[in-house]
Image (tube, coloured by chain):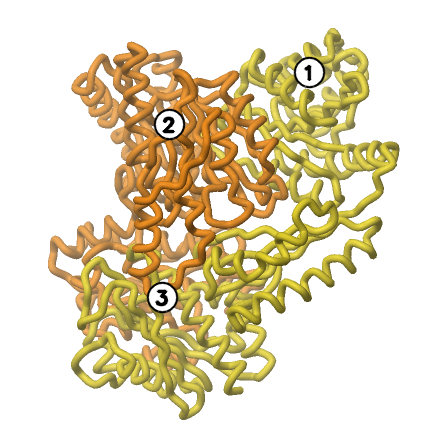
Chain colours: A yellow, B orange
Amino acid sequence: MRVEIVAVGTELLLGQIPDTNSQWLGEQLAAHGISSHFHQHVGDNHERIVAAFRVALSRSDAVIVCGGLGPTQDDITRAALAEVMGAALERQDYLVERIRAMFAGRGRPMSDNNLLQADVPVGASVIDQVRGTAPGLICPVGSQVLYAVPGVPYEMSEMFTRAILPDLLDRVRAEGQTSVITSRVLRTWGASESGLAEAVGSRFDELEGSERVTIAFLASGIEGIKVRLTARGDNAEHAKELLAAEETVVRSLITDAFGDVIFGVDAEAMEDAIASRLSARGLTLALAESVTGGLIASRLVNVPGASNWFKGSVVSYASDIKFDLLGVTPGRVVSGLAAEEMARGVRTLFGSDVAISVTGVAGPDPLDGHAPGTVFVGIAVGDEISHVELRLPGDRPRVRSYGAIGALNVLRQAIDRIL
Amino acid sequence: MRVEIVAVGTELLLGQIPDTNSQWLGEQLAAHGISSHFHQHVGDNHERIVAAFRVALSRSDAVIVCGGLGPTQDDITRAALAEVMGAALERQDYLVERIRAMFAGRGRPMSDNNLLQADVPVGASVIDQVRGTAPGLICPVGSQVLYAVPGVPYEMSEMFTRAILPDLLDRVRAEGQTSVITSRVLRTWGASESGLAEAVGSRFDELEGSERVTIAFLASGIEGIKVRLTARGDNAEHAKELLAAEETVVRSLITDAFGDVIFGVDAEAMEDAIASRLSARGLTLALAESVTGGLIASRLVNVPGASNWFKGSVVSYASDIKFDLLGVTPGRVVSGLAAEEMARGVRTLFGSDVAISVTGVAGPDPLDGHAPGTVFVGIAVGDEISHVELRLPGDRPRVRSYGAIGALNVLRQAIDRIL
């Protein structure tokens, strides 16, 4: 069973809104072990919608169509479905009554446009509307099927879960396919995408052509490199076992090559890794940020409960703030020594258990004899002060963003090592 | 000239990441008057990528392919392009040298995988890599063309603007389409999308069906509401005149309805509006951030030359930092008084001309008797201290982000009023 998603709407082509529906549906299908090989976007044009449906039916078994079921002149999905089915549109009296009743119930006048939503291709069945006014449609085409749902995410998701997913799972079972897919993302910082690929290369080659397990790499900029493991099992339990076994293999390949670069799984961000470590140990944190300009603080405060362990930050952008407020020795402000003094200074100022500091060169010009991308991270844990030098690629915003997550990674490793 | 966008990556089908590339490219093509009728997503599978390219070439004149150009085993776009072109892949020595030099420059070892990025289909030309390691490709297929760019948004957008857009515009001109499209975005903060649409409604109706000028609204979250004016002229001069005339009309409709809500044009962000005002007057700025947690500082330091006017920020997340370091009267920390004391305190601490502060409730629970979304902005200009109360919608990250741009907007208006 291969399902294609076709999102209808000129606003998607013009980039006026993001297509969150295809992403959500893709996630749902994958979670239920249903394959999806293609998505399409098409505008509000009859011939082109019909063409998109025909392409989808030529390469997929089922199609989920989002959008174009509303009451306005540019809602033309129903007519396109009828054409692909080779069927006429018929107005359904019970739907007319239901739409009228819905408006009456809300005490709002109804324009006749709304009755377009009662038109159903002959041979299609209706997915009752629960959250909006437009019914969904299930349109068989031979042994294939087109499902149509409104583009409003809140209406789409309800109809998918209630009517489309059960119908798809019935079809999957009828095909005799009962496998279940599950996946896990390992979040890494500190190894390159190509380095990870090489470290996992032998395993990747072993799995070549495997129907059971796959590995994929995803460079995610300031969120690091993600390694996605996907397992297809005969049932949920089997899929889980395959995934766990694969995770053990891949974790050890990565750790052997790069050490402690896996900071979390799935949606865990670097700041979550910091939060769990500080909370578990009952420690508080303060920051002194120069080159990162507040980015580290702004990531940390997004963690729920941050006020339990985060005291705050001094963004010491001007040098005199470093000297006067943080007690840095006047002189060069980009150095390991300055980073250490900043960390010590802000730890004292804020009375925290742990402090980190960041000073460096965002570029484009060198500073204090250091090339752009040079960043010093100072760490104060109790009275123990140290620093780490990072070399980061990219322009100013990239150096800052990489510096922020890089500094948090230094802190993560320091906590694990020292505390 | 009809351009189709094909985004390559299994992670898009699985819904693991949103496809921001197609949206951005759609916006860019529309802004330059180039039609796009279809988008596709396809996974990292050779046969299916080839199939998607063939479908695209059957219904569009040019195809922009995003993703699958990286150094790992699942980066297979190059081979699919070669197959559609009916050409072999050849490793280019000068690209090998360039990739080696790039790694050497960063002092990082290079795994041999990276050399895959030097493979080019015979007959294709290369878009030099500026921001990453993977070059882009321009692949002619008869009179049609496939452009391939990396999936990393930051690399994709640079290559599109530098190499693909000019090539597309050349093709449009070669087709004999000589009209020139130009557009301008008015950036607003403080009016709703429906409010702006109503204010501009009469003009919108006058332009109904116009081939010359169009107005579109684009809600852009924490960047405010954008109003895009597009003019199609017989030549560049004519388009410019039409656009300037339209801008005058629309600006006055918006300003009459909402006052000073237009803070910039095109790519000008709120922080640029602040930077130009402070630089012009030779003033320095300091911040005290509580609920925004460093977000304001991190926006400001992205402006080139920020060190000329930005002193720094105290992110006073814990209450005792507000009391001890900023001199806020112990007690409630979410109030207009606390905001004023924070602004006064940080202005004194950092010795700046101007200071602003932000304290508020990100939610989900009320604090100090204030509902989530309540944010107080304190402003200290010399010895003149005042505050403004904002009411912001959304969850915690939204309240923070809206609070950051909202506070900068308060500062912008205060500078214009007072200084």
**Could you tell which of marks 1 and 3 lies nearer the N-terminus?**
1
Name the quadrant containing residue A272. bottom right
Q: Which corner quadrant of the image does residue A240 belong to? A: bottom right
Q: Residue A133, can we see it?
A: no
- Say which chain tag 3 marks: A
Could you tell me residue B166's position as x and y percent? Answer: 28, 28
* Image position of B407 (left or right of A279): left
Classify residue B9 as left or right of residue A374: right
Is residue A70 in view from this perspective?
A: yes
Distance in Å between CA atoms under marks 1 and 3: 52 Å
Q: Residue type at mark 2: give it.
A: Gly
Image coords of residue B415 (percent x, y): 20, 54
Q: Amino acid at mark 1?
A: Leu
Tell me the SS state at disc 1: helix
* Residue nearest the viewer, comparing B411 with A305: A305
Q: Nearer the viewer, residue A246 or B191?
A: A246
Which of discs 2 and 3 lies nearer the camera? The answer is 2
Q: Which residue is mark 1?
A: A81
Read off the residue under disc 2. B123
Q: Is residue B356 left or right of residue B317?
A: left
Q: Secondary structure at mark 3?
A: loop
- Gap between marks 2 and 3 measured at Cα: 48 Å
